[in-house]
């Protein structure tokens, strides 16, 4: 725009000059309008100027005409320049409009990219929030699992203590019952032997009685004379037998009641055994269902892992694409473009990963999936352990309930053995009484046979009646003994069954112990797995934290993305230099540490005094013995680098000096050709100005030290002063100096006047 204003001002000045030239002479304007072409104007101007120069005696009118023509020619040249500038201005305006359009497009792209970045940032924040929520949820679940596991361990320990207590008490009771049973068996065997002996003695006595009764045929005649004492003896014996029969009947009823109780206990035991069998069947069914569920869970886990390994078909190149271009490449509708823009834009600004990082991230994802699967299996195993714990609780409770009837049955067996022992004692007493009675009867009969008294028929009938009663009593006793023996056999069978059930219970206890040991080992293995899972979870959390830092810092590269970069880029060069510096510093530190260790070893061996003496004697040792080789190499390398930099600086300075000399020469030549003066610059800041038209007219200007610093900012302030003058110059040089330098304080005006005067004088000299 400044160029346009200057051209317009030149155009106005040229118009004014043309108007003045038209007022001077119409012929001049006609001639100027007729020679507007470029070549003709230049040729006529040169011809006319040469004629004017040859003819120095022309009047002032022609000279004025010459200046007018020159002004007209300059105006025409200015007009041509103005046209050129106008065309250039139009082209520049066109370029400006094109640049504005490009700026609008770039602004639209910037706004679009800003929107995409905002959406991507929101998506990252949302994903980070979801990841944190999932992490908190997993931590809560893990804490709950730990609490439940600790509770299970505590309850398991309590159950083990209760089981050990019950087992000790049961073993103690069983040992006591076994000892009591052995003692009762010994007593029963002894009493059975005594009973057999008494039976044999009774048989012998019965045979003696039969022989005695057969040897006394006249007993019927002598019965009438039996004294009253014998009748009283028989009545007492009959009463005793009647009381004995009543006792036997009461004992029989009591034994029948015990048999009924034993039958009911046997039925209860059978029902419990049936219930145990049903529970075992249910346990087998649940185990089969659990195995099926485990197989299904394994299938689901394999399917999930396979699905994670399956490459995603929706992943594309991470290069930034326009939504329309993306829709064209993917074959989507315009409705699907908006849905896919967020994903593609999220992949645009992320840094591209290397192959190693992609493989590490894939391995981390696989480990994360495996850890999730292990966590699920651990939860399922914990649920199974809870079920097994409940089953163990039920089994221990049922076993405790079964131990109570076992103890009750042992008590019943003991009471039965005591009853049997008491019965044997009573049988022994009755046998002894019968033996005494038979001995008394035999003695009485022998005395009666010896006295040969008269027998009565009534007495014989009574004797027969008593014999019949005696035989009935024996028969009843035999029946009762047979019933007692059957009851004892049943009790023995029940005891054998109880022993068998006890053996079965022991086997079952052994199985339960084996299962408990197995469960303990499984629990220990689960603890180890849980610790491993916790460690792996900690590592995964640490890696997740690191990945968050990488993502937040913009250094994370997603999978299936490749970073393309130039071989020599600033980042790679900086990283290489940084790593080289770090390696160099590490080597230097290691060398210094090694040197320090050696010095400490020498000081420890030689002592403080010897070390000081050695340091004094070895003060002239070379640097190579005191400084590590790595540090010396670093210093040498730095020195070489500085020398290279110095050489480059010297070359650059030399080149600049050469360029400065060449440009200063060009500058002096340009000043000489334009201003008509020669300039010479001195180191002290002075400048010598010599006119080309008069070499003797030279002037030396120096900086004005008296001028204040504030005057430098003034538009007409002088910071140079005339120091010296040469021998030549125009005649009115003092007047010019007084006017231009002292009065006007304008050095350029002074130099212009000097140049004009010198030019006029040199032209006059050339003319003469």
Image: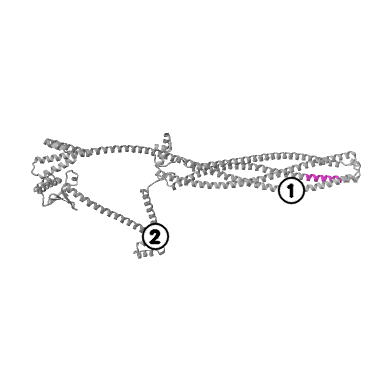
Magenta span: helix, strand or loop, mainly?
helix
Residue labelled with disc 1 = 187
Q: How many marks?
A: 2
Please indicate whether residue 189 sits to the left or right of residue 309 in the image. right
Badge 1 crowding class, 10 Å Cα cut-off, few under 14, some 14 to 19, many 20 or more, is some
Q: Residue furthest top?
A: 335
x then y, percent, for residue 43: 16, 42
Is residue 286 on the magenta stretch?
no
* Residue bounds of the magenta highlight: 427-443
- 612 lies above or below 72: below
Residue 341 can be seen, yes or no: no
User: Disc 2 vs disc 1: which is toward the camera?
Assistant: 2
Is residue 436 on the magenta stretch?
yes
Q: Secondary structure at mark 2?
A: helix
Q: Secondary structure at mark 1?
A: helix
Badge 2 crowding class, 10 Å Cα cut-off, few under 14, some 14 to 19, many 20 or more, is some
Which of the image's four quarters has the N terminus? top left
x then y, percent, for residue 92: 26, 39
x then y, percent, for residue 190: 76, 49
Describe the colour scheme in one phrase.
one colour
How far apart marks 2 and 1 lie (CA) works out to: 98 Å
Front-lying residue, 617 or 342: 342
Kindly identify which numbered label has been placed on residue 107: none
x then y, percent, for residue 249: 77, 39
- 712 lies above or below 593: above
Residue 739 can be seen, yes or no: yes
What residue is rendered at 27% in x and 54% in y? 651
Front-lying residue, 7 or 137: 7
Residue labelled with disc 2 = 595
Please indicate whether residue 513 sits to the left or right of residue 146 in the image. right
Work out whether mark 2 precedes mark 1 in sequence or the reverse, and give the earlier one: 1
């Amino acid at each position: 725009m400044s160029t346009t204003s200057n051209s317009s001002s030149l155009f106005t000045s040229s118009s004014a000059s043309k108007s003045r030239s038209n007022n001077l002479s119409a012929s001049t304007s006609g001639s100027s309008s007729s020679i507007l072409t470029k070549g003709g104007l230049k040729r006529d101007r040169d011809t006319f100027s040469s004629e004017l120069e040859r003819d120095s005696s022309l009047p002032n009118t022609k000279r004025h005409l010459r200046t007018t023509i020159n002004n007209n020619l300059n105006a025409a040249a200015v007009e041509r320049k103005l046209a050129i500038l106008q065309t250039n201005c139009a082209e520049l305006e066109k370029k400006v409009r094109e640049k504005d359009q490009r700026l609008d497009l770039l602004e639209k792209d910037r706004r679009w990219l800003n929107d995409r970045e905002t959406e991507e940032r929101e998506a990252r924040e949302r994903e980070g929030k979801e990841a944190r929520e999932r992490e908190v949820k997993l931590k809560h679940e893990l804490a709950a699992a730990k609490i439940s596991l600790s509770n299970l361990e505590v309850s398991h320990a309590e159950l083990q203590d209760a089981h050990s207590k019950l087992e000790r008490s049961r073993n103690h009771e069983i040992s006591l019952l076994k000892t009591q049973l052995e003692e009762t068996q010994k007593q029963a065997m002894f009493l059975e032997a005594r009973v057999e002996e008494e039976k044999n003695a009774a048989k012998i006595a019965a045979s003696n009685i039969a022989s005695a009764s057969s040897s006394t045929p006249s007993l019927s005649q002598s019965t009438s004379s039996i004294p009253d004492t014998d009748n009283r003896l028989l009545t007492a014996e009959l009463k005793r037998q009647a009381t004995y029969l009543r006792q036997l009947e009461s004992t029989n009823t009591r034994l029948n009641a015990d048999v009924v109780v034993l039958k009911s206990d046997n039925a209860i035991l059978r029902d419990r055994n049936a219930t145990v069998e049903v529970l075992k069947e249910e346990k087998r069914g649940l185990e089969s269902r659990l195995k099926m569920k485990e197989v299904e869970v394994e299938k689901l886990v394999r399917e999930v892992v396979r699905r994670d390994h399956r490459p995603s078909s929706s992943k594309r190149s991470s290069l930034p694409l326009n939504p329309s271009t993306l829709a064209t490449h993917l074959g989507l509708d315009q409705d699907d473009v908006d849905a896919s823009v967020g994903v593609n834009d999220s992949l645009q600004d992320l840094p591209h990963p290397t192959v190693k990082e992609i493989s590490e991230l894939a391995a981390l994802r696989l480990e994360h999936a495996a850890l999730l699967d292990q966590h699920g299996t651990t939860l399922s195993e914990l649920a199974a352990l809870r079920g097994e714990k409940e089953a163990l609780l039920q089994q221990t409770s049922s076993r405790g309930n079964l131990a109570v009837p076992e103890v009750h049955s042992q008590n019943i067996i003991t009471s039965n053995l005591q009853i049997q022992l008491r019965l044997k004692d009573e049988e022994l007493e009755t046998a002894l009484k019968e033996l005494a009675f038979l001995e008394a009867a035999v003695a009485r009969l022998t005395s009666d046979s010896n006295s040969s008294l008269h027998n009565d028929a009534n007495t014989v009938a009574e004797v027969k009646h008593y014999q019949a009663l005696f035989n009935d009593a024996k028969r009843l006793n035999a029946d009762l003994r047979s019933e007692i023996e059957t009851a004892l056999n049943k009790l023995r069978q029940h005891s054998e069954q109880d022993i068998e059930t006890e053996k079965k219970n022991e086997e079952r206890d052994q199985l339960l112990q084996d299962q408990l040991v197995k469960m303990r080992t499984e629990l220990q293995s689960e603890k180890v797995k849980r610790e491993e899972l916790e460690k792996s979870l900690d590592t995964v959390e640490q890696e997740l934290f690191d990945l968050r830092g990488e993502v937040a810092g913009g250094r994370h590269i997603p999978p299936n993305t490749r970073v393309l970069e130039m071989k020599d880029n600033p980042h790679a060069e900086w990283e290489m230099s940084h790593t080289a510096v770090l390696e160099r510093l590490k080597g230097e530190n290691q060398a210094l540490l090694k040197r320090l260790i050696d010095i400490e070893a020498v000081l420890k061996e030689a002592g403080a005094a010897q070390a000081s003496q050695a340091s004094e004697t070895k003060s002239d040792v070379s640097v190579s013995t005191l400084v590590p080789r790595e540090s010396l190499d670093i210093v040498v390398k730095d020195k070489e680098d500085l020398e290279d930099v110095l050489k480059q600086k010297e070359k650059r300075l030399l080149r600049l000096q050469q360029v400065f000399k060449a440009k200063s020469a060009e500058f002096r030549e340009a000043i000489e050709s334009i201003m008509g003066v020669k300039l010479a610059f001195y180191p002290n800041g002075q400048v010598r100005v010599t006119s080309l038209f008069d070499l003797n007219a030279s002037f030396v200007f120096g900086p004005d030290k008296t001028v204040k610093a504030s005057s430098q900012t003034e538009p007409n302030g002088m910071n140079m002063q005339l120091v010296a003058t040469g021998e030549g110059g125009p005649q009115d040089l003092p007047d010019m100096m007084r006017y231009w330098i002292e009065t006007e304080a304008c050095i350029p005006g002074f130099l212009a006047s000097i140049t004009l005067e010198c030019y006029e004088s040199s032209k006059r000299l050339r003319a003469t």
